[in-house]
């Protein structure tokens, strides 16, 4: 059985709009997957419909043994395992944990441009307690941006600004590169 929580998480790049198909195929093969989704309203000529879209378009995350990646690469719709050149790199566990916590929270989220700079904050209360990142403000609401450094992609999750406190530079105890959250 390929699923084993001792293996690292890797980012899988898929063909455009094949994320759901690839996820179904890999789950069928027994792999542990993470395909974070968000709800979005789309307008057609005759109606407006709410659809679920990937937070990281063209990517999903899979936990597997790097030495046994051929079944993944042979899955229809899989383009490659993300890395540097031909060397796949694992996604930081703290980044995956932050994304999973944001999804479990049920708070509204959306894709967000990748951020590397800004005021770092730590969530003190609520379902995202303990996460650190950069606080941002959008349309009068505060959000925390969670990033995946390897993909240079991010997502934003809504948070009450009363639940966060700023972190002085250099004092981040649980900082993980790419596990960044919002700016104002």
Image (tube, helix red, strand yellow):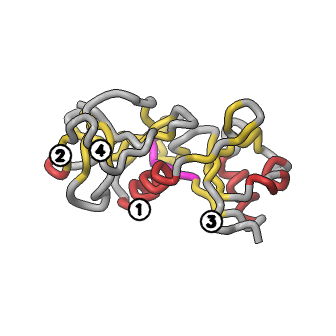
Residue 161 lies, in percent from the top left, at 18, 45
Comes first in the chain, label 1 or label 2: 1
Comes first in the chain, label 1 or label 4: 1
Above or below, comparing residue 166 to residue 28 in the picture = above
Mark 4, Cα crowd under 10 Å, few <14 / some 14-19 / many 20+, is: some
Task: Decide whether residue 90 is among the magenta residues.
Answer: no
Report the Cα–Cα distance between label 4 and label 2: 12 Å
Query: For the residue labelled by badge 3, is the local secondary structure a helix, a strand or a loop?
Result: loop
Query: For the residue labelled by badge 1, is the local secondary structure a helix, a strand or a loop?
Result: helix
- Residues at marks 1 and 4 touching, judged by CB atoms closer than 8 Å: no
The residue drawn where x is 42% and y is 34% is 112
Residue that extends furthest to the front in the rendered view of this protein? 170
Residue underneath mark 4: 172
Report the Cα–Cα distance between label 2 and label 3: 33 Å
**Residue range of the region highlighted in magenta in the rendering:** 35-41
Numbered circle sitting on residue 6:
3
Comes first in the chain, label 2 or label 3: 3
Numbered circle sitting on residue 161:
none
Which circle, 1 or 4, is nearer the viewer?
A: 4
Residue underneath mark 1: 104
Whether residue 45 is visible to the viewer of this picture, yes or no, is no
């Amino acid at each position: 059985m390929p699923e084993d929580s001792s293996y690292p998480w890797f980012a899988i790049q898929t063909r455009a709009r094949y994320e759901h198909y690839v996820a179904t195929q890999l789950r069928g093969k027994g792999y542990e997957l993470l395909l974070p989704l968000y709800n979005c309203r789309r307008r057609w000529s005759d109606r407006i419909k709410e659809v679920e879209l990937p937070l990281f378009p063209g990517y999903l995350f899979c936990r597997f043994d790097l030495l046994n990646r051929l079944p993944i690469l042979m899955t229809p719709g899989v383009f490659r395992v993300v890395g540097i050149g031909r060397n796949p790199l694992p996604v930081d566990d703290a980044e995956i944990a932050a994304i999973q916590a944001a999804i479990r929270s049920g708070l509204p989220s959306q894709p967000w441009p990748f951020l590397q700079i800004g005021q770092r904050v730590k969530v003190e209360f609520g379902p995202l307690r303990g996460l650190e990142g950069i606080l941002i403000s959008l349309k009068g609401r505060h959000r925390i941006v969670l990033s995946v450094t390897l993909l240079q992609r991010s997502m934003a999750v809504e948070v009450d600004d009363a639940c966060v406190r700023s972190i002085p530079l250099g004092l981040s105890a649980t900082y993980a590169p790419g596990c960044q959250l919002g700016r104002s």
